Amino acid sequence: MEIDVDNMSLDDLRALKTRVDRAIASFDARRRKEALAAAERAARELGFNLSDLTGAGRGRRGGSGAERAPKYINPQDATQTWSGRGRRPGWVVEHLEAGRNLEDLLA
């Protein structure tokens, strides 16, 4: 599939970039889920629970805890994500203050 970006308007280019950034983040999230599922299956086959092997789920004292999958993605910069837990990042606050919805940022 070839896209003629040279003849696209700036708005169209930005929209395309947003779609590509979201697609990349979604792809990464799917691959991460697949890898986690495979690791859980392998641990189960050997008679273990993955969280027991990794130390996940022990709370703050046992380590930094499990990293949450991103639920929200900054449409302007797909490297900025938020799990939806804890304090809202500045880009989420700015998005909401501009009168937009949180659902616009769903991964």
Image: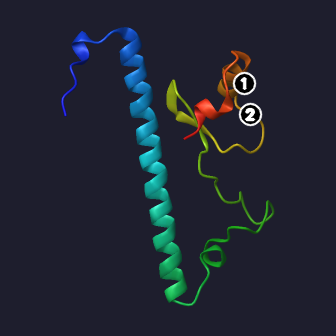
Compared to residue 79, the image places residue 97 above or below, namely above
Question: Which residue matches tag 2?
Answer: 88
Question: Which residue matches tag 1?
Answer: 93
Relative image position of residue 98 (x, y in whole percent): 69, 15
Q: Dot 1 surroundings within 10 Å: few (below 14), some, or many (20 or more)?
A: few
Residues at circles 1 and 2 in contact by the CB criterion of under 8 Å: yes
Q: Nearer the viewer, residue 96 or 38?
A: 96
Q: Secondary structure at mark 1?
A: helix
Quadrant the C terminus occupies: top right
For image coordinates 18% across by 29% down, the residue present is 2
Q: Mark 1 or mark 2: which comes first in sequence?
A: 2
Q: Going by the image, does 103 lie left or right of 6?
A: right
Q: Secondary structure at mark 2?
A: loop
Residue lying at the far left in this picture: please name it: 2
For image coordinates 46% across by 36% down, the residue present is 22
Task: Point out which mark residue 5 bears.
Answer: none
Quadrant the N terminus occupies: top left
For image coordinates 42% across by 31% down, the residue present is 19
Relative image position of residue 45 (x, y in whole percent): 49, 88
